[in-house]
Amino acid sequence: MSIEPSVRVEDKLFYNRYLVDAGRAHIKVRPHTKPSPELLSMLKACPARCYELNDKGQVEITVDGCIECGTCRVICEESGDIEWSYPRGGYGVLFKFG
Amino acid sequence: MIEEKFDAIVVGAGMAGNAAALTLAQRGLKVLQLERGEYSGSKNVQGAILYADMLEKLIPDFREDAPLERHLVEQRFWMMDDRSHTGLHYRSDDFNEEKPNRYTIIRAQFDKWFSQKVREAGATVLCETTVTELAQDAYGKVIGVRTDRADGEIHADVVVLAEGVNGLLGTRAHLRERPKPDKVALAVKEMHFLPRETIEARFNLKGDEGVVIEAAGTISRGMTGMGFIYANKECISLGIGCLVSDFQRTGETPYGLLDRFKRHPSVAPLIEGSEVKEYAAHLIPEGGFKAIPQLYGEGWVVVGDAAQLNNAIHREGSNLAMTSGRIAAEAIFQVKSRKDPMTADNLSLYKTMLDQSFVIKDLKKYKDMPALMHTQSQSFFLTYPELVSRAMQNFLRVDGTPKVEKEKTTFRSFIKARSWSGLFGDAFRLARAWR
């Protein structure tokens, strides 16, 4: 199997249009010292790569590129790792094609 | 609070919500439809295939002005390993008919058109409004919704929850559980733009003819999943989806999977030189019949993806959404016509009517398929595609090996990979679940 070229998700998100609701993240990660397995799985499962590990080994989220699929809600909401809502009306991703 | 009271509030403007709002408005009910997007369609994601029959029941002359892409004349199923695909293609000139049966569409554009029909029928459509929770009385009866607008509470006799696969409101009000990771698939999709003539040449199409490719095999890396390639007029919808629980288990990335699918030697020539204009992701209900939640209650009904109404085997969802939306609206209209209250007892008519439709009958037919596909994903998505590819290559490659030996080799490779009991077991389980 050949070695995979790294896929830059940022480039993909650049195609999309967003109206960012500054200062009002619609998804919040519960403060933690050590992330749960569910939360850690989001580093790879999030299709917009919104979840990242900081230098203390905690999982952080930046919602600006979120495409509102709900994968993290399905994986992480039940355990209380995250709080998940839709963005306020009109905000968030704006699909031209869908 | 908005003082005005409505006969019905429809939450969401996708296929199910638009079908419900349109039907209710056509029957003369006072309808408010709420949509969180900038316009109806701006949050909606699908492959997408439109099934004409279900739309005809709502808008008989839709072909006159609906933004349709291509009518489908060909379906290709591909079983893929890393370097090949074994295909089953069906193409028929019968599909070049006066009223074609299936079309490709672009959801954001189609839904905008559909929403205009809803408005023309007399419904009030309020966009850029996120419903935050259901308003309930002291007894738990749903009496309306709360939104993120300043004067946010709005009342109605009944609320139609067409809030999509993620259905937050229903979960927040404890009407149903949040979908489990093994009951939903995450699909990612790109829109690849190419000149019309290029698409028609690459897919062997004339005029508005269209083709769909559904692909399964090693492209999903042993996970339960499928890839798809849909030809639109001037772009190709290309995507791949797998169960969320499989992504969680394997640590595969959705965009990595998409990238591999795009670079597959059978796929790459189809999209070569294209310009990508959008990247989207969406969840798809995959739990089938057994995952259908409670469909009605005191002052509410749930329709479409929010009710997990999706036929994963036939890749049908939007038609189930449209039909459930229409049937829910018809049930509400009947209750209303009798001047009865919107109680759970009375709204159970919706379930009775849905049970008699193809929606529940089809899902019931395949009720054991999701479990089979989800537990046997290694066999169905890795082992068999590789075996079939080796068998095909062995059959076709002319190298002086006697045919008897070739057949023996193929035969042995199947036994070695799955054993006698494994092969018969898989065949038996598949036949039983399909029945």
Image: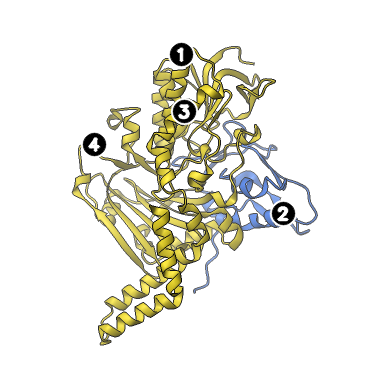
Chain colours: A blue, B yellow
Observer-side mark, 4 or 2, equals 4
Q: What is the distance, in whole Å, between disc 4 and disc 2 at their CAs? A: 53 Å
Quarter occupied by residue B321: top left
Q: Does label 4 lie on the same chain as label 3?
A: yes
Q: Give the residue type that dot 3 points to.
A: Tyr
Find numbered disc 3 in the image and state the secondary structure of the residue it sits on.
helix
Residue B223 in the image, given as x and y percentages of width and height: 51, 61
Q: Which chain carries label 3?
A: B
Query: Is the C-beta separation of discs 2 and 1 under 8 Å?
Result: no
Q: Mark 1 points at which residue?
A: B338
Q: Residues within 10 Å of mark 1 (few under 14, many from 20)?
A: few
Q: Name the residue under label 3.
A: B350
Q: Does label 1 lie on the same chain as label 2?
A: no
Residue B300 in the image, given as x and y percentages of width and height: 55, 26
Query: Is the C-beta separation of discs 1 and 3 under 8 Å?
Result: no
Question: What is the number of the mark on residue A87?
Answer: none
Q: What is the distance, in whole Å, between disc 2 and disc 1 at their CAs? A: 55 Å
Q: Mark 4 points at which residue?
A: B99
B217 lies above or below A38: below
